[in-house]
Amino acid sequence: MGWDQNQMTQSDPIATPFNRQFSYFVHSYYVQTPPKNVLATVDYGIQLPSIVRQNNIIGMQFHPEKSGQVGLAGLTQFKEMVENADYSRN
């Protein structure tokens, strides 16, 4: 629990605002997922996924709403992605 620094592992617009930025983690749970789904990690002695994405499903291990300005930037990025999404595809 506490603040930790995200490191992007793949290029993706949703992860960009968090790259090399500190965000706030409230619990110690983490997802186990294939590396192709991991956009960013944090170092807790091992690399843990902090941002994951599979198609249009996005998950963040940390709490953007508790992560100050960097969290606000990430939520703004998410809002813009939703507003600009192409909903003509299923």
Image: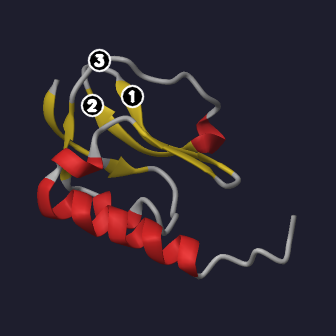
| Quarter assignment of residue 68 | bottom left
Instruction: Locate the N terminus and report the quarter of the image it occupies.
Output: top left
Q: Residue at x 48, y 69 (%)?
A: 13
Looking at the rendered structure, the kind of residue marked 3 is: Ser
State how far apart marks 1 and 3 are (Cα): 10 Å
Q: Residue at x 27, y 31 (%)?
A: 43
The mark that comes first in sequence, 1 or 2, is 2
> Do tag 2 and tag 3 residues touch (Cβ < 8 Å)?
no
The residue carrying mark 2 is 43
The residue carrying mark 1 is 48
Q: Secondary structure at mark 2?
A: strand
Q: Secondary structure at mark 3?
A: loop
In the foreground, 50 or 65: 65
In the foreground, 48 or 75: 75
Q: Position of residue 83 (x, y in %)?
A: 55, 79
Q: Residue at x 56, y 71 (%)?
A: 82
**As drawn, 41 above or below 55:** above
The mark that comes first in sequence, 2 or 3, is 3
In the foreground, 58 or 45: 58
Closest to the camera, between mark 1 and mark 3, is: 3
Horizontally, residue 59 falls left or right of residue 22, namely right
Q: Position of residue 64 (x, y in %)?
A: 28, 50
**As drawn, 8 above or below 28:** below
Horizontally, residue 65 falls left or right of residue 30, namely left
